[in-house]
Amino acid sequence: MKKLLSAVVLSTMFGTLLTGCSSASTETTASTASTAAEDKGDDSEVTFTIGFGQEPPSMDPQDFNTTACTLIGYDCYDTLLNFSLEGSELEPCLAESWEQIDETTYVYNIKKGVKFSDGNEMTMEDVLYSMERVKNDGYSMSYLFDSVDHFEVDEEAYTLTVYLTQADATWKYVPATSPCTIVEKAVVEAEGDNYGTLSGSCVGTGPYMLSSWDSGTEIVLVKNPYYWNDPESLDVDKVVYEVIEDATSRALAAQSGQIDYARSLSSETLPTYESASGMSITSYSGTNASYVALNCSVAPFDDVNARKAVAYCIDKESYTAIIGGKYSQAKDAFFMPSSMYAIDTDAWTQAGAEATDYNQDYAKAAEALAASKYADGFEFTLYTTAALKTGAEMIQSMITESGLPITCKIVEIQSSESFAISYGYTVDENGNRVYNALMTGWISDWLDPTGYLTNCLAGRSNYQGGANKSAYSSSEFDSYLDESYLLDDDAARSELMLKAMEVAVEDCPVIPLYESLDTYIISDRFEYEEGANFFWNFTVADVHVKE
């Protein structure tokens, strides 16, 4: 969803019809707001500065599937619902109430009187357009609408009705995710592909709106004067996003007081963050984990024993201690973080501990290699970004130390290339993903095992834009997983998903590395708390000035 996750950036770390949030016209809006403040003698403007490692590809919600988008997008836009702080419940947002009519029908009562940041009122036509745009245009996140048959709106009653093709136990979560972000139809249609870009507009219903965007340097947001939840309720007047790609430079910016907030604190930079006076570090159990994806569609990893041979070379405990650091924990046989076990914690914890764990055992690696069709040895490419290269080199060293005729060749790619490569947009002459293995990770869409199993391993997620980075395909795995969507009972769903997980462990399409706690550092001048589903609902509206 989905997304290049914060586990991936763990080591690295947006009148007239077209005004509102456009990068050009909102400069005037911001200037006017500033002049008004001066006229009132108000010199107490509160600025909150965020340091982050990668700017978003655009400010169009169709691109909201990276952490860079998360940290900016939901300040300018709203979804139909929000996740609760702990992540397991849903709360109103643009939909003030909702109900499930039957197993395939959901009705959402949309808030009336909401305005976009250009002053135009949000209509049910905008709501329908936003939803159908996702379903029809093929976003990278459109897979969340796979079970949708069609949408209907009642313009007088202000209701959106969602009709599913079949029961879907996970649909209830979808309205709190980026595919259910509402945009203004007239603006998006007028600008087409230009919408959300540096020269285009960004018009949403969120608490803030785009003031300026200096690509590669800084993005500035100011209060949306039309915010439906009252702009005066916002403690922060201006949000500044400093683009600091280098992780060490970002940590030094926190240490010097240049920024007020940063997240994904790597083990290398943690000492610098810890030495920052007037700032506090918070950690909590999140939904991200790091792993190696093995491309099952091409040699040598089209052979299960070749996959196991490499997996048995890796010492996950040592890797986690050195690469994951203080806020991480080595994974068991399951590649998803333990927060995903909430559906049936005891059963999943026990199953994960009992399943075959391909931790370092060179004797078993040799046995697996001998049983493969590449018994004489093989070479493979391991793709990585600069941010993850140290980990890739550690894996390379472990394989070399095995003494086996297996050669790991590291291929470093630019961060600008990583999205296209990871999601299968970049392919070879046969249409296959270009790597043999990939240093990667994931953030779940929600606190449910499907957030990992479906996105990362389901056959239907192996497409151009899909997150099945292993190009894994198993009819048995898919049958168990697909059946789980049809049930309401969590225990029965859990049993089926555990069976699917067992199939995947035996097939070894991924090598689990570690799960990491979500961490962030924030200035002691501010109060803020985030939870497991921050990815979908991060907003500076939740940041308050300490009294």
Image: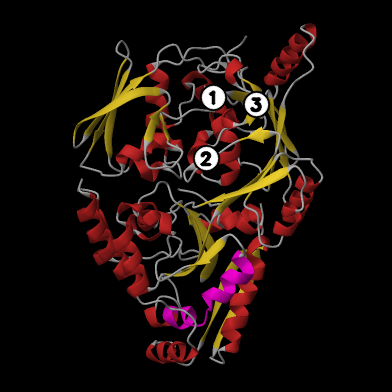
The amino acid type, in three-letter code, at marker 2 is Phe
Quick one: 172 or 185, which is closer to the camera?
Answer: 172
> Vertical placement of 207 versus 346: above or below?
above
Q: Position of residue 329 (x, y in %)?
A: 52, 65
> Percent position (x, y) of residue 218?
74, 36
Is 138 included in the stretch rendered in magenta? Answer: no
How packed is label 1: few (under 14 Cα within 10 Å), some, or many (20 or more)? Answer: many
State the residue position of label 3: 210
Q: Which residue is mark 1?
A: 206
- Mark 3 or mark 2, earlier in chain: 2
Specify few, some or many for label 3: CA neighbours under 10 Å numbering under 14, 14-19, or 20 or more.
many
| Colouring mode (rainbow / by chain / secondary structure / one colour) | secondary structure
Nearer to us in this view, 75 or 540: 540
Residue under label 2, please give it.
64
Residues packed near mark 2 inside 10 Å, few (<14), some (14 to 19) or many (20 plus): many
Instruction: Inspect the magenta stretch and tell me whether residue 313 lies in it.
Output: yes
Magenta: main secondary structure: helix
Instruction: Tell me where residue 151 sits by quadrant.
Output: top left
In the picture, measured across the screen, residue 95 lies left or right of residue 484, that is: right
What range is drawn magenta here?
307-324
